[in-house]
Amino acid sequence: MSASRRQVLASTSAVGAGIVFTGALSELFAGTAAARSLGRTGYGPLVPDPDGLLDLPKGFRYRVLSREGAPLRSGEGPVPSNHDGMAAFAGRGGRTHLVRNHENRPTAKIRVPAVEGLTYDPEGHGGCTALELDSRNRVLSERVAIAGTAVNCAGGRSPWGTWLTCEETEDRAGDNGHTKDHGFIFEVHPTDPHRTGAVPLTAMGRFQHEAIAIDPRTGVVYETEDAFLKPFGLFYRFLPHKPLGGVGSLRAGGRLQAMRVPGVPDLSTVQETGASFDGVEWVDVPDPLAATTPTRLQDYGPGGVTHAQKLEGCYWGGTCVYFVSSFAHSAEGSAADHFGQIWRYDPHRRRLTLVIVFGPDTDVQLPGESPDNICLAPSGGLMVCEDGNGAQHVFGVTRAGEVYAMARGRQNIGTPEKPEWGEFAGVTFSPDGETMYVNCYTPGTTFAVTGPWHR
């Protein structure tokens, strides 16, 4: 990300500053609670936090739920580093359960502690932790939910109330000290992690997973791949043998397929919002376990498959699945450049549409490019975690298409002369919509943000 910063959500036809849409934004919120209104100006300017942790608009407040290095309440060890993707689940008596990823590599400062029955690979440093909160967001418990995995980046929730955590790596046994192959998805139960254990869902593919979303009508799982080298990642779907079968059903296997958009080998070449492509095809992945060749490099026949750089967030909204391409750089191998895209795939129509294009501007106070984790906000619109250089924000996007800063990180991980701030990740809302939970990646910090969300 350039130090000049960027304004998101400008169409490629826009002139100068401002945010322009071609009528697609409203479709993001169809059939969701976000159809309710939110003021066009967001919640007002950010107020500097005297404690130097998190700037929020007036009327909002935060509670620090957890910080890396502090003792886990379970006594299993310290809170691990690198807080990433996260989801919130409803509990009894107004309680909330959070499941939080830790994107730990072998170089991580604090690994996820190994726990008997929950550890996949003793030499894997990543995993998930689970927090239980009361109705006032006070932490009741905090424990390891899965350990021995690697580079747990994002993931997604299942319709039956579990978390699917994704490994963003292709390490094999022997790589980086690992004793088992990595690059899988694992199911994590938010309240009883021993029920799901540490079992890789191998049929869902072995690649650099980023995020998933599940069609609640059919059980089809959509998966993004954040591959770092050209050819870049693919957009996949998994057809489970036991769709919507509940906890553990994904272990029964299924078919993994990759998306082919006829005539579009690289999504970065599409630059205008509203551009649609009918007749999207799905091609079986020859070897989902990638025994000899990464899935994105395998032979998909004369038509090939469609690639995209930096495929990140993925979520289900209304009747469609949405996924994010954070950026594309031709200097790194993409066919064209962009500052971020959000795509919508309609399974019923087999239609892919470019919904939002993130575009350049020079206002350093407004959103940058490189959208990452993204979620629907119950008060209307989106919340987007920024992942780039300079100041780091959580940005809101109203249904009217306006962008506003919702939070700014204040924990300087650089120096006074050259400050740096950790990215935000894992933005999610409580089941009642009254609390936004979000992580600061470094130093690993989990916040609960409350305030006049429905103002």
Image (cartoon, grey):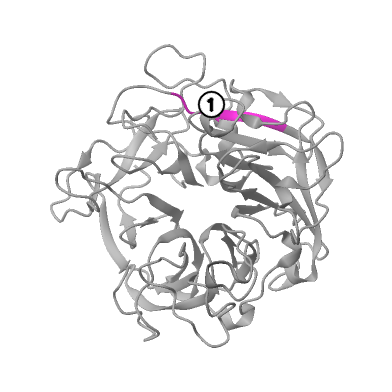
Name the residue nearer the viewer: 4 or 216: 4
Q: Is residue 169 above or below residue 147?
A: above
Amino acid beneath label 1: Asp
Main secondary-structure element of the magenta-colored stretch: strand
Q: Is residue 358 above or below residue 121?
A: above
Q: Secondary structure at mark 1?
A: loop
Residue at screen point 68% across, 44% down: 234
Residue 380 visible, this angle: no
The residue wearing badge 1 is 337
Furthest toward the top, the residue is 15
Q: Position of residue 203 (x, y in %)?
A: 76, 63
Residue at screen point 36% across, 49% down: 423
Which corner quadrant of the image does residue 121 belong to? bottom right
Q: Is residue 52 above or below residue 277?
A: below
Q: Quadrant of the C terminus?
A: top left
Q: Which residues are magenta?
A: 352-359
